[in-house]
Image (tube, rainbow, N blue to C red):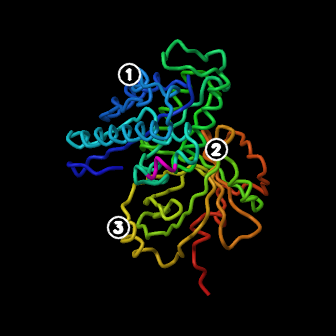
Amino acid sequence: MDGALNREQKITRIVITGGPCAGKTTAMSWIQNAFTKKGYLVLFVDETATQLMTGGALWKYNRNNKEYQFCVTRLMLAKEQAFTDIAKTFEDEKVLIVCDRGTLDNRAYMTDEEFRYVLDKLDTNEVELRDHYDAVFHLVTAAKGAEEFYTYANNACRYETPEEAIIADDRLIAAWTGHPHLRIIDNRWDFDRKMLTLITEISSFLGEPQPLDTRRKYLIRYPDVQALESRPNCQRVEILQAYLHSEVPGEMIRIRQRGRDGNYIYFKTRKRMIEGKKRIEMEERLSRNEYLELLMQADPQYRPIRKQRYCLSENGLYYNIDIYPQWNDRALMEIELYESDEDVPFPEGIEVIREVTGEEEFTNPAIARIQKP
């Protein structure tokens, strides 16, 4: 989240993405109404691909896709930066910048070679390009589970058949997999409930009125890492985290370095458990220097944790599979649910030993705690 001219100003940048005919256009109206009432200045960055196509620059006619995607991505970044800079000129304390698609949406329409070309030409990397957004909300295409509502009537630029829409939806989810705050909202409900769920998820992320975490945790057999890495909907993330001392009873303060291959982002997170399986969680983005300064203040009762996290998007859910260097026969899997008591479908190839939600032994602070002799 960005700083501002007003020290109290908080700018949050989120992405609304999804497959064709997922409800993004309607979602923008719902977001405007809901968060204006909550006191936010809501700014919208329009969809760049649609802007180009309505101007005649149709993607399907381009003969040099890597240059086309470079131009699209560069324009998206410029528009996002302009909105962020303009937001800083306002006195509003709470600003929500809503991006109608983000830069990683373009990844779904490129080969690996083309994507590397775009990254190199932009002088950036995948972690920075993906994670400069604070949260990503993916609306699943109506072609998955609500086929009777798939239509071309509400978007003149839509050309995909339902079958093509499903493929595009899967590729978009895979492109964003690895983001620390990705939520997938499918068609298990009617359309109004789908929109209400989106508003609830955004509200929870923003802490309006308070973010309730409904995660479930499972002890699993050590997974086939090679099989995970071969799946297009799975991304490996390197995590280093440490704990700070808190004066609030029952509160844990964590700082985290997250990324891969030398490219990282940094967070500070406060957590408090309530009602058994639910917890309050508030998070803020740190600069590298802020992170390093706080790291020097780490609580000596805890050792830093290093782990490999595999982010897997499947079954309309987002699974985090954590592999610790000190374990060679087991791992932990965490799932963020819509309701804490809903049935959990497990990913293919994952062998669950048992649920360990709420068990102190399998929390990161317990794993990090230094045992006294």
Q: Is residue 108 left or right of residue 57?
A: right
Category of crowding for the residue at label 1, using alpha-carbon neighbours closer than 10 angstroms: few (below 14), some (14–19), many (at least 20): few
Q: Main secondary structure of the magenta part?
A: helix
Most extreme residue toward the top is 153
Q: Secondary structure at mark 1?
A: loop
Circle 2 sits in a helix, a strand or a loop, which is it?
strand
- Mark 1 vs mark 2: in front: 1
Q: Amino acid at mark 3?
A: Asn
Bounds of the magenta segment? 116-120
Residue 144 appears left or right of 83: right
State whether residue 267 is above or below residue 156: below
225 shown above or below 245: above
Q: Amino acid at mark 2?
A: Ser
Residue 112 in picture, x, y percent from top left: 58, 47
Which residue position is annotated with label 2?
A: 313
Residue that badge 3 annotates: 289
Residue 203 visible somewhere in the drawing: no
Q: Residues within 10 Å of mark 2 (few under 14, many from 20)?
A: many
Q: Tell me the quarter of the image containing the C terminus.
A: bottom right
Q: Is residue 313 above or below residue 192?
A: below
Residue, disc 1: 55
In terms of sequence position, does the residue under pointer 3 or pointer 1 come before the other?
1
Q: Amino acid at mark 1?
A: Gly
Where residue 285 sits: x, y (%)?
Answer: 39, 55
Residue 75, x across and y down, in percent: 36, 37
Judged by depth in the image, the label closer to the viewer, 3 or 1, is 1
Nearer to me, 124 or 44: 124
Q: Please report whichever mark, 1 or 2, sits nearer to the chain's N-terminal start.
A: 1
